[in-house]
Image: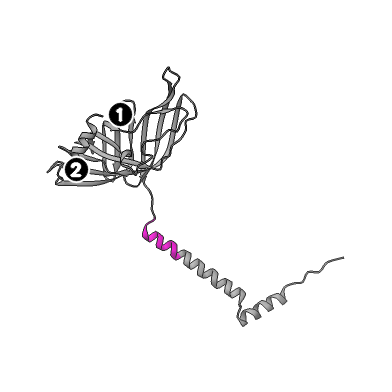
Amino acid sequence: MKFLGFVLLLSLAAAPCLKADTFQVTSGYIAVNTVNDLGSWSFSGNAFSITGSGEAGFCGVSFVATGPITPCGTNSGTSGSQLAIIGSSILNGTQSLGFDGLWGVNGLTPFFADGSNVFTYTAPITFVGSPVACSPLCFAPGGINDFFNLNGDAGYLTMVLTKFDDGQGNVYYEKTSEIYTITGPVATPEPGTLTFLFAGLGAAALLFKRKTSRLLNPTATERQHYAVKSSAAPSISASA
């Protein structure tokens, strides 16, 4: 963790590279052992896949057993809640690249454990950020920078916490692992789909309006037709 922030700072300060591609991530995961801050990740999308492992910078891991537990990314709109990953990766099974980036999640709120010795917490999330795979150095002049867009991807967080006693009467929950699963971009209707939808609703409303108007205000021919049908209907009389 000591070099993580320094490397990220250097990468952001360096000159832009000559080659930069952006890949939309549609599935994958980021798994972290929060005891030693080591992680692994796997992203895939249209005609690409990338896997990697390395160091992961995350928020605090210990919480008072009776107090609220705050998942990483609870305050993703602020500078202190971004999550960092750095290490090595393999793109499409052959190309070795470094990996460096900031990302975060939205949709999380503090929660309370149920008192069990091992507690598993699962919650839906939305991803933000675009980690980058690079060679020889991230954002180095003339280098390769491939961005992996997570913005708007849906998924869920699975967090495992273990209860422990420090021997002095203090009971804590310690996060032992976090898995951020990506299930894909949030689905939005295509413009053409919306056009057909609204057109269909408009046609149904117009048809209903016309039928209602004809029933309340029939023409002379319709009134005569209804009168003939009414007189032709058989009568029902009560039998003794």
How packed is label 1: few (under 14 Cα within 10 Å), some, or many (20 or more)?
some
Asked if residue 119 is positioned above or below residue 226 in the image, the reply reads above
Local SS, label 1: loop
Q: Residue furthest left?
A: 142
Kind of residue indicated by mark 1: Asp
- The quarter holding residue 98 reads top left
How packed is label 2: few (under 14 Cα within 10 Å), some, or many (20 or more)?
many
Q: Quadrant of the N terminus?
A: top left
Q: Quadrant of the C terminus?
A: bottom right
Residue closest to the eye, 78 or 57: 78
Which residue does the image show at 28% across and 36% down from the upper left?
84
Rendering coords of residue 16 (x, y %):
16, 45
Kind of residue indicated by mark 2: Asn
Residue closest to the eye, 174 or 229: 174
> Which residue is identified by label 1?
37
Sequence-wise, the earlier of marks 1 and 2 is: 1
Rendering coords of residue 103 (x, y %):
30, 40
> Which residue is identified by label 2?
145
Q: In this orientation, does residue 198 appear?
A: yes
Q: Is residue 177 magenta-colored?
A: no
Which residue does the image show at 19% across and 39% down from the upper left?
11
Q: Is residue 191 magenta-colored?
A: yes
Residue bounds of the magenta highlight: 189-199
The rendered magenta stretch, by its main secondary structure, is classed as helix
